[in-house]
């Protein structure tokens, strides 16, 4: 559908189980874009940082929403998933704790990605 577009979609999830609809929206948009062939970078910040850990996405439930673990799998298969450095540190999460394929990076990398030519950023 959108394959071949030279744009990147950077999605920042700022909510987790504390605001399930907002969280699910971020993951749904990112996974939909990834499935459509768009280059996607999903940032996990605030409470969504917990989904960088194994098993956490499987425990998330929201009626009428695709399973978060499946959405995360789609994004990881073709895109990038990043946990915020400070958010991870506040939760005592380090690089050895996260799902394979998830990186931990900070604001400088986020700014670099969002300011790149052709990038579109969405914050949920």
Image (cartoon, rainbow, N blue to C red):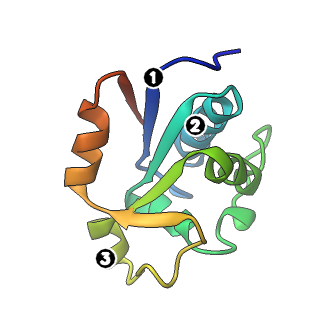
> Counting residues from the N terminus, which is met first, the one under dot 2 or under dot 3?
2
Estimate how packed mark 2 is, as few (under 14), some (14 to 19) or many (20 or more) residues with alpha carbons within 10 Å. Answer: many
**From mark 2 to mark 3, how far is it between C-alphas?**
25 Å
**From mark 1 to mark 3, how far is it between C-alphas?**
32 Å
Q: For this rendering, which residue is in front, 27 or 41? A: 41
Instruction: Work out which quarter of the rendered image holds the N terminus and state it.
Output: top right
Q: Position of residue 86 (x, y in %)?
A: 26, 68
- Secondary element at image label 1: loop
Q: Position of residue 62 (x, y in %)?
A: 72, 48
The picture quadrant where one finds residue 21 is: top right
Could one spot residue 49 in this view of the protein? yes
> Counting residues from the N terminus, which is met first, the one under dot 1 or under dot 3?
1
Residue designated by label 1: 7
User: Which mark is on residue 90?
Assistant: 3
Could one spot residue 124 in this view of the protein? no
Residue designated by label 2: 30
């Amino acid at each position: 559908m959108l394959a071949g577009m030279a744009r990147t979609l950077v999605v920042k999830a700022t909510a987790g189980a504390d605001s399930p609809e907002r969280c699910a929206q971020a993951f749904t948009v990112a996974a939909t874009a990834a499935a459509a062939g768009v280059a996607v970078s999903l940032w996990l910040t605030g409470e969504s940082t917990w989904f960088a850990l194994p098993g956490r996405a499987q425990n998330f439930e929201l009626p009428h929403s695709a399973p978060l673990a499946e959405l995360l799998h789609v994004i990881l298969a073709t895109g990038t998933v990043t946990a915020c450095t400070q958010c991870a540190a506040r939760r005592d999460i380090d690089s050895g704790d996260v799902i394979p394929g998830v990186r931990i990076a900070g604001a400088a990398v986020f700014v670099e990605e969002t300011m790149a030519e052709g990038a579109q950023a969405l914050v949920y």
